[in-house]
Image: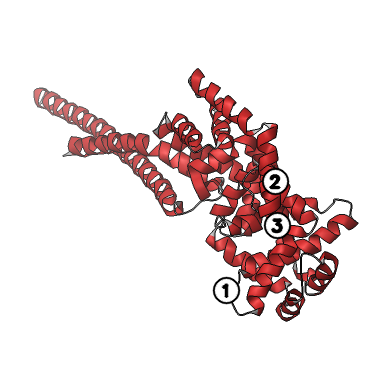
């Protein structure tokens, strides 16, 4: 029975040791992710380790997919990620990416996209954004949007209040841009990107709800309705003055911060990177996190966000599972220590019992010898 108890304890050590060896790597990774959950750069690196470990062709496949949809910027971002991670790519694929990047950066392509952004007010790359911002800086784009949406509002038709509010805010920021000799340009560009993302349906639902609520707070709707009824692109000075009177600048702080964060993302990742961020963001905090991520990852940011989605910005849906890994490791370690303790106690008890038995046998032998000697003497 004694040796059975020792064998059971030794079996517990072996079983717990084996389980701990299996659980420990997952628990260590889970702990690192939980610690990094408030740091988008560190969190994205840890999650990239997981994703890339599962599929060694993931980067190459995404480059091919980006080239197939004529997104040279995204393909180049994956090349930067591969370079950073020491992932080998075929020379012909790298050559195709370089050719695509040069084609999209050509003067003729830039001029065409600039004109598109200036005329339509929609942007999806650097060139078209330049045209859109140029139009908004000269108030043409914002007046166009305010007059269009404002007249829908005045006539009781479906109105995109978010575009209306952003355009009104943009007019006020544009005036500040001129006063500060360009100091507010980053905010202006950021608000233009948010407005463009809304127009083309690439603004995340949560962010759209928040921005719409913020836009309503900064606009005096009755005053704006009266301003746009008689407003016109042909009378920009009169129209801007009327619209500015309906704008509550004291409540625009949240939108201004959003515009700054969007511009920070665009500066590091390009216009499409900013659009990607606005598509997955559920609120201004997500955009602020994306700005921190972009500052850390630079040109790799679009590739990171393509692979991880909103998970690149924060820990979503996995905290419970991660905690389970840590709990499993803790319980397994407790079991291992308990088995070691039990084994030590039982071996010690066996050694003590054996020593006591030897002492008793020697005493018994001595007693028997004494009795024998006494009998002989008698």
Q: Nearer the viewer, residue 63 or 105?
A: 105
Q: Nearer the viewer, residue 280 or 135?
A: 135
Q: Nearer the viewer, mark 2 or mark 1?
A: 2
* Quarter of the rendering containing residue 335: top left
Instruction: Name the residue beneath numbered marker 3.
Output: 191
Q: Quadrant of the N terminus?
A: top left
Circle 3 residues within 10 Å: few <14, some 14–19, many ≥20:
many
Q: Position of residue 360 (x, y in %)?
A: 21, 33
* Quarter of the rendering containing residue 17: top left
Instruction: Give the alpha-carbon distance from disc 2 to disc 1, as whole Å.
Output: 29 Å
Q: Residue at x 76, y 50 (%)?
A: 134
At mark 3, the secondary structure is helix
Asked if labels 3 and 2 touch by Cβ distance under 8 angstroms, the answer is no
Instruction: Give the alpha-carbon distance from disc 3 to disc 1, as whole Å.
Output: 22 Å
Q: Earlier in the sequence, mark 3 or mark 1?
A: 1
At mark 1, the secondary structure is loop
- Can see residue 116? yes
Q: Position of residue 317 (x, y in %)?
A: 45, 54
Instruction: Name the residue beneath numbered marker 1.
Output: 158
Q: Nearer the viewer, residue 81 or 181?
A: 181
Q: Which mark is residue 115?
A: 2
At mark 2, the secondary structure is helix
Q: Residue at x 9, y 26 (%)?
A: 375
Q: Position of residue 153 (x, y in %)?
A: 64, 76
Q: Position of residue 171 (x, y in %)?
A: 78, 63
Q: Residue at x 46, y 44 (%)?
A: 30
Q: Nearer the viewer, mark 2 or mark 3?
A: 2
């Amino acid at each position: 029975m004694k040796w059975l108890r020792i064998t059971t304890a030794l079996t517990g050590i072996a079983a717990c040791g084996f389980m701990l060896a299996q659980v420990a790597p997952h628990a260590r990774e889970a702990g690192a992710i939980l610690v990094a959950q408030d740091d988008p750069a560190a969190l994205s690196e840890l999650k990239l380790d997981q994703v890339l470990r599962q599929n060694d062709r993931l980067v190459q496949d995404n480059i091919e997919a980006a080239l197939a949809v004529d997104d040279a910027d995204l393909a180049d971002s994956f090349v930067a990620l591969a370079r950073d991670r020491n992932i080998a790519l075929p020379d012909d694929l790298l050559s195709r990416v370089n050719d695509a990047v040069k084609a999209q950066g050509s003067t003729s392509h830039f001029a065409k996209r600039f004109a598109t952004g200036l005329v339509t007010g929609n942007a999806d790359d650097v060139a078209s954004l330049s045209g859109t911002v140029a139009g908004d800086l000269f108030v043409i784009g914002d007046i166009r949007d305010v007059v269009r949406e404002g007249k829908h509002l005045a006539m009781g038709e479906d109105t995109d209040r978010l575009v209306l509010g952003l355009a009104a805010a943009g007019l006020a920021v544009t005036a500040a841009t001129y006063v500060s000799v360009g100091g507010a340009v980053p905010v202006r560009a950021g608000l233009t990107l948010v407005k463009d993302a809304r127009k083309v349906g690439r603004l995340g639902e949560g962010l759209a709800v928040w921005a719409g609520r913020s836009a309503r707070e900064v606009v005096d709707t009755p005053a704006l309705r009266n301003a746009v009824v008689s407003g016109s692109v042909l009378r920009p000075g009169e129209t801007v003055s009327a619209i500015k009177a309906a704008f509550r600048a004291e409540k625009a702080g949240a939108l201004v911060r959003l515009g700054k964060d969007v511009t920070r993302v665009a500066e590091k990742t390009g216009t499409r990177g900013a659009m990607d961020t606005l598509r997955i963001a559920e609120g201004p905090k997500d955009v602020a996190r994306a700005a921190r991520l972009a500052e850390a990852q630079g040109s790799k940011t679009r590739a990171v966000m393509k692979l991880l989605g909103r998970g690149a910005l924060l820990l979503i849906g996995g905290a419970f599972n991660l905690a389970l890994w840590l709990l499993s490791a803790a319980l397994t370690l407790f079991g291992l220590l308990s088995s070691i303790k039990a084994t030590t106690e039982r071996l010690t008890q066996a050694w003590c019992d054996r020593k006591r038995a030897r002492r008793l046998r020697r005493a018994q032998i001595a007693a028997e010898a004494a009795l024998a000697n006494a009998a002989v003497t008698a």
